[in-house]
Image (spheres, helix red, strand yellow):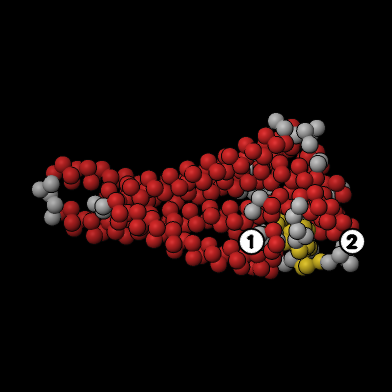
Amino acid sequence: MDIFTNIDKNKRESFLLIAIFIGFITLLGAIFGTALGLPKEEWISSIIFALFFSSISAFFSYFFSDKIILAISGAKEINQENAKELFRILENLCMASGLPMPKFYLINDPSPNAFATGRNPKNAAICVTTGLLEKLERSEIEGVIAHELAHVGNRDTLYMTLVAVLVGTVSLISDLFLRSTRFVRGNNNREKEKEGSSQIRLIFFILGIAFSIISPIIARLIGLCISRKREFLADATGAYISRNPEALAFALEKIAMDKTPLRNANSAMEHLYISNPFKGKKILNLFSTHPPTEERIKRLRGMVGTV
């Protein structure tokens, strides 16, 4: 598969998953609304209410999470004077991608890893560990930085903020439904004369209970799937920026083989890193923020000669 086909494929799959997510929320609203005996207008209003409150926390996360993330990770900003070679790599890649120069940060940690953060290309930051600089060749470091620039250019912070809003909405409307069931029980006892309607309501009520329990898990799994698709997209876009998919493939191999755990690894930041920072911990692919490294390397090597 050539590099452009790969990029287009991953974009389409990401959009499709978001559409499925929105459809899933609409289905939940319909099931919960029918179970509670609400008219269509009321359950749609409930979804809007849940979206609004989920968006509030996501709003603050979108604008301020980069500062929190950099502080938690122990990153220190570096400048052109004390890292000339790194800045030369970054400048060349920014010219190739058409992106503005992000801020550059360094984490004093022997584990090779990197991440990008920031709400948009003008407010972006790229962070690498000392382990990455010590253990990778120049071309491989270039491949990693190109991958992180791809996250910036693809606006993945905005994309994953949207995912957080959708996951939060599912959790909130599920919780609202469970809280509302205590009032419905009393109403159902007073409406026994409507036998046919009552039986349909009972079926939807049971469905509603089941969905209210499993839907937050389903929402989380869809969110993780989207995160994995964005990693594939960043790999393909990064390979296009650097014009060297093989270098990124070698970098991923070395990072995966290195078993040094990241000292300041945090589960809230797991999806940001180029590779899972929790070394040595087996995670089912279904519950991972990253695609299998072997699959990423295979796809990258399939792009060699197509740039």
| Residue 219: % across, % down | 47, 49
Q: Which residue is mark 2?
A: 84
Spatial separation of the CA atoms under disc 2 and disc 1: 26 Å
Tally of marks: 2
Q: Residues within 10 Å of mark 2 (few under 14, many from 20)?
A: few
Q: Tell me the element at label 1.
A: loop
Closer to the camera in the image, 50 or 45: 45
Mark with earlier residue (2, 1): 2
| Residue 71: % across, % down | 68, 69
Residue at x 13% of width, y 44% of height: 195
At label 2, which amino acid type do we have? Lys
Q: Quadrant of residue 292?
A: top right
**In the image, 35: left or right of 145?**
left
Q: Quadrant of residue 132?
A: bottom right
Which callout, 2 or 1, points to the residue nearer the camera?
A: 1
The residue positioned farthest toward the left in the image shown: 193
The quadrant the N terminus occupies is top right
With respect to residue 76, does 188 lie above or below?
A: above
**In the image, 27: left or right of 152?**
left
Q: Which residue is mark 1?
A: 119
| Residue 80: % across, % down | 86, 65
